[in-house]
């Protein structure tokens, strides 16, 4: 049977109102009484009703995770971030309201005006994100997983995607590759100016220029047929191509298959690096040298930042996680037979 507040009061030898005060902190009670009430709560397994708890504390103990599922998004990776946010929030006794509709400012305003949530985490951040003016005006704390072009006054966390693009190129350059290409996200991701995709291009371009490499950038739809078309185009336009960086989880395996069907062995003729989850890179027929997407760490730290903000603590505005490259079988020196 469900344990009620009256059961806790009877077990602890206090009044129901005293149990309520121990939970809400609205009135002072002695430390001895508080400990006795908390011991009864633990022993009986009492959990306050969410609505009553919210009324008592003026808090809902709910976080909003705003993930508009736009075209071009790789949903399995997004869900890794979401799972990390949910599991971390539960450790802090918070639930998560997942908002996936493309509602922009209107969706944020609706959630804020109804007091459904205490704080917000936003994903799929654009360089010139239209949600920023409203986000800055809300009376609820927020954290962005991603960095807009102008991040002043906001709390942002993400992998350093610019450094990730650079690190992939530096790895290929150190192996002697002089002609490289970036196979990137679907075209609509770049049209929206999605921040993480743009920063990979920035890093890739900066590193190829610095190392004097010939390079091109090719957006790619998330489909095997599109991977085949991009592979054919690359070999037609860059016949001396020996190194590829892939930032598109959905086409990593089809792209490698396409290159091999076109006569290029990986890594004998073509070295491939990727920015993707470790489990994907490790699972392929030729394990791929990659920079991992730290989805679990980013999700956890985003929630921790929110918890600190809700407690009134100062937090850093920018948290950039450095990329870590794991070398596997898909890259080799340029002159490998």
Image (cartoon, grey):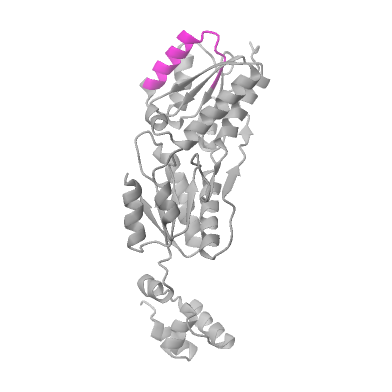
**Residue 99 percent location from the top left of the image:** 35, 51
Most frequent secondary structure within the magenta stretch: helix
Q: Which residues are magenta?
A: 226-244
In which quadrant of the rendered view does residue 229 lie? top left
Q: At 33% from the left edge and 61% from the top edge, which residue is drawn?
A: 113
Who is closer to the viewer here, 119 or 270? 119
- In the rendered view, would you say 326 is above or below 214? below
- With 304 as the anchor, is 113 left or right in this view? left
In which quadrant of the rendered view does residue 51 lie? bottom left
Any part of residue 288 in sight: no
Who is closer to the viewer here, 255 or 240? 240
- In the rendered view, would you say 43 is above or below 222? below
- In the rendered view, would you say 172 is above or below 82? above
**Residue 328 percent location from the top left of the image:** 61, 28
Residue 210 magenta: no
Q: At 45% from the left edge and 55% from the top edge, which residue is drawn?
A: 86
């Amino acid at each position: 049977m469900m344990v009620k507040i009256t059961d806790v009061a009877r077990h602890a030898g206090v009044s129901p109102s005293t149990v309520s005060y121990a939970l809400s902190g609205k009135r002072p009670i002695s430390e001895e009484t508080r400990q006795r009430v908390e011991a009864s709560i633990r022993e009986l397994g009492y959990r306050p009703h969410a609505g009553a708890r919210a009324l008592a504390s003026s808090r809902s103990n709910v976080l909003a995770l705003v993930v508009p599922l736009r075209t071009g998004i790789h949903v399995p990776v997004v869900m890794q971030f979401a799972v990390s946010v949910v599991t971390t929030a539960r450790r802090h006794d918070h639930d998560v309201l997942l908002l996936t509709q493309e509602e922009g400012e209107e969706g944020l305003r609706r959630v804020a005006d109804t007091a459904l949530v205490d704080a917000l985490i936003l994903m799929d951040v654009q360089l010139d994100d239209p949600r920023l003016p409203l986000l800055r005006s809300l009376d609820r704390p927020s954290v962005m997983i991603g960095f807009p072009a102008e991040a002043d006054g906001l709390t942002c966390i993400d992998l350093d995607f610019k450094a990730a693009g650079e690190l992939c190129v530096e790895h290929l350059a150190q192996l002697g590759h002089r002609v490289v290409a970036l196979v990137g996200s679907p075209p609509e991701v770049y049209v929206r100016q999605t921040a993480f995709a743009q920063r990979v291009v920035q890093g890739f371009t900066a590193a190829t220029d610095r190392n004097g490499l010939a390079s091109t950038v090719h957006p790619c739809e998330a489909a095997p047929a599109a991977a085949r078309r991009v592979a054919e185009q690359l070999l037609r336009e860059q016949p001396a191509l020996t190194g590829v960086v892939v930032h598109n989880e959905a086409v990593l395996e089809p792209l490698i298959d396409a290159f091999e069907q076109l006569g290029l062995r990986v890594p004998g003729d073509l070295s491939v690096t990727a920015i993707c989850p470790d489990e994907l890179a490790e699972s392929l027929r030729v394990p791929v040298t990659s920079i991992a997407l730290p989805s679990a760490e980013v999700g956890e730290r985003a929630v921790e930042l929110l918890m600190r903000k809700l407690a009134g603590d100062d937090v850093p505005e920018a948290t950039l996680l450095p990329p870590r490259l794991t070398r596997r079988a898909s890259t080799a020196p340029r002159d490998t037979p």
